[in-house]
Image (spheres, rainbow, N blue to C red):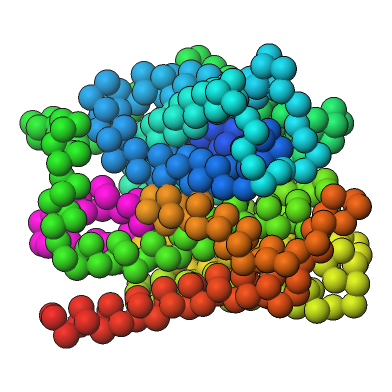
Amino acid sequence: MSAKPTFREKYAFPSSFWNANVTELFERAAYYSMASFIVIYLGRLGLGDYWPSTLNGVLWFLVYFLPILSGTVADQIGFRRSLLLACVLLVGGYFLMGYPVWFGGQTLALQAGKDVTAGSAVMVPVAAAILLIGIGGSFVKPCIAGTVQRTHLGKATLAFGIFYTVINMGSVFGRLTAFFVRTKLGRLDTIFIVSMIASVLAFLTVLLRYRDPEAAVDPAKPKRSVSEVFFGIFKVLGSGRFSMFLVVSSGFYFIYNQVYNVLPLYVKKTVELSPAMDLYTMANPLTIVLFQLAITKAFGKLPPIKSIIVGTVIIGLAMLINVAPLFMAGGVTARVLLPVGSLFIVMTVALIAFGELFAAARLYEYIGSLAPKGQEGLFLGYANLPMALGSLVGGPAGAWIFNRIMCAGAVKLPSGLLRLDPKAAAAGWILLTLFGLGSALSLWFYNRWLQRQS
């Protein structure tokens, strides 16, 4: 009987593995330092009711879609060079995001206006920032995940468990740091300074510590070019079953995307003037860290499609609970530790994390089962397409639901907040819920159709 491995032996991974994870921690900290406030910041910068969420949707789309191409580039030029390039792009992107306030003479309004008042001096650097952050961020995850894959030493489950834990630790670290800095300095734009510093720390980690792991693939196997990867999208989309799944599963990410679109707008414009959205959305990574093992152990044997459906139902119902405070005495601004509206938003974010635990990880497993035999790797390379599509549509659609439905008949109060018509606001939350439940139902019908085809 072999002796039980010691702690040191169990967690013995090459230095590239640990340095890659430290890099991931700083990069995630940089991104989530600003993610919860981006639509609020852009609105206060004068981009009106719709551009902030639309641009945020584009950013998330780039981060999810471009790894298809950037991962291939990283394989060609090496992970280390790719990560260094990514960090430089990220620092530049976060700098340009803050540029209009720091050097462009712009001031942040107390509350976002309906109309676009920003000119090219704001639009150009913000658009460039979105592009740089999207491209830079798209390089990081393929390189880090690729390093973990090549250095797990036969302990893949443990290695990727550490990787996903680090992602959530970085998310919490970034949010906490941003909260401390912006509240101490009293300026929202300082969140981009936190993002820049975290990106610089990631750059230094790669420059001074990280080295490319040895390839764990057959060197005789030819590498695919960027053009081959790009045109591979059309081959994958040529599969009717995958294209249908792309459409029906993107509903999950449409709802998930509202954590960073509808929820910040709702709290900022109707509940409190200075919401701690970084702390409120921290309920997502904390829930995942605390319950990931328990959910996996209790429900890991569920078939992938059933798990995805359960997660989609949960994420849809998470929106519905926000109807309750609309009809409570005192409304959404009544306080119970926090304003009641904000308290329910925290609960929504936590429930969405539970939905993510059921659905997100099983998505890859299910896509692998959809692929024709021998093409599993090709199809899994495009597994982020549902996230990309859901995010791209979720940005502008979320802004429309909030502004046209939830805020219909709203009255502006002397404080600057909006007093919503409870029925109109409830209709918006119910619409989001129905979208989530409809997506879950379409997944069920899709699976029934697929079984009949088989």
Say which quarter of the image contains residue 149.
top left
Quarter of the image containing the C terminus? bottom left
Q: Magenta: predominant secondary structure element?
A: helix
Residue that appears at 60% across and 76% down: 430
Residue 379 in the image: above or below residue 109: below
170, above or below 207, in the image: below
Q: How many labels does the image show?
A: 0
- Residue 57, image x, y percentages: 49, 46
Q: Nearer the viewer, residue 424 or 14?
A: 424
Foreground residue among 380 and 233: 233
**Whole-percent x, y for residue 100 in the image:** 65, 22
Side (left or right) of 106 relative to 394: right
Tell me what residue is drawn at x 68 percent, y 53 percent: 265
Magenta region:
364-387
Vertical arrangement, residue 221 with respect to residue 77, above or below: below
Which residue corresponds to the image point at 76% horizontal and 71% vertical from the top-left?
421
Quarter of the rendering containing residue 61: top left
Task: Say which of 417 and 138 sits in front.
Answer: 417
Quadrant of the rendering where the N terminus is positioned: bottom left
Q: Quadrant of residue 387?
A: bottom left
Indicate yes or no whether the magenta region holds residue 368: yes
- Residue pictured at 59% horizontal, 26% vertical: 119
Residue 78 visible at all: yes
Q: Horizontal and vertical percent for residue 349?
A: 65, 61
Report if residue 378 lies within the magenta region.
yes
For this view, does 222 lie left or right of residue 301?
left
Position of 257 relative to 318 (above/below): above
Q: Determine if residue 341 is in view.
A: no
